[in-house]
Image (cartoon, grey):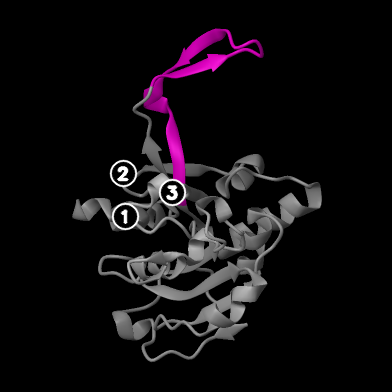
Amino acid sequence: MSNPSSPVSAEGRGGAPEAWLAIPAGGQGLRMGGGVPKQFRDWQGRPLLRATVEAFLAPGMPRLAGIALAVPEDRLGEVQAWSFGVPLFAVPGGATRQASVAAALAALPEGPDLPVLIHDGVRPFPPAGPVREALAALAAWDGAVLGEPSTDTLKRVDPEGRIVGTEPREAIFRAQTPQVARLHVWREAFAWAEARGFEGTDDVSLLEAMGLRVKLIPSPATNRKITRPEDWLPDPAQG
């Protein structure tokens, strides 16, 4: 289930750990074709999921206390062999993304109530600045989420397709990940949702449904999600 031993501790990477990383990657993700879940397809010489995790170990990112990955059961052996220099907890994913997140959260050990960064396994370009801003927001907010400001004109329509309004785009953001809250807050939120049969469209929607306060952190479009064949392009920072 876990690979807690590592050649380099979190403290050895430059101080006390600041956060956990939890990634739900239990889906089959076969829209790309080829019979391989997209999170395990090759991305610059390693699986996309591994590349996404490694992005959080880059300079400027918060120091991780450990990583929880919820993956397809037939990929557990492969993932448990990965080493990132911090404890790794690999568990089987659930039937839904929400169930996989809950499984990843349950795998994290009891201890300091650190923030947990919940991130998409196929979003390999997390921006360090907004990630740190989201963590800092927890001093005053229950949760935080990265979001891309809308550049489109958005129309609201009725069931017949008639336009009934134009939304002010300065108030509209496309939610990204990571989505951030302290471990106990996430666990309480997912338990609350399970007890009520509530399925959120993203993680912070559970916090919103509970009446908690969530801060939106603006984030660039480069923090993109790889979901379709046309998304399978080089790192935008490299042109």
Q: Quadrant of the N terminus?
A: bottom right
Which sits earlier in the primary sequence, circle 2 or circle 3?
2
Q: Residue at x 50, y 59 (%)?
A: 38
- On the image, numbered disc 1 is attached to which residue? 127
Q: Are marks 1 and 2 in contact (CB under 8 Å)?
A: yes
Circle 1/circle 3 CB separation < 8 Å = no
Q: Is residue 38 visible?
A: yes
Per the rendered image, the range of residues in magenta is 153-177
| Above or below, comparing residue 205 to residue 8 in the picture | above
Closer to us: 238 or 115: 238
- Residue 176, position as x, y percentages in the image: 45, 46
Residue 149: image x %, image y %?
Answer: 36, 34
SS at badge 2: loop
Q: Earlier in the sequence, mark 1 or mark 3?
A: 1
Residue 120 falls within the magenta-colored stretch: no
Residue receiving disc 3:
229
- Looking at the rendered structure, the kind of residue marked 3 is Pro
Above or below, 208 against 126 in this view is above
| Residue 116 appears in the picture as rendered | no
- Going by the numbered disc 2, the residue's amino acid type is Pro
Residue 220's mark? 2
Describe the element under mark 3 as helix, strand or loop.
helix
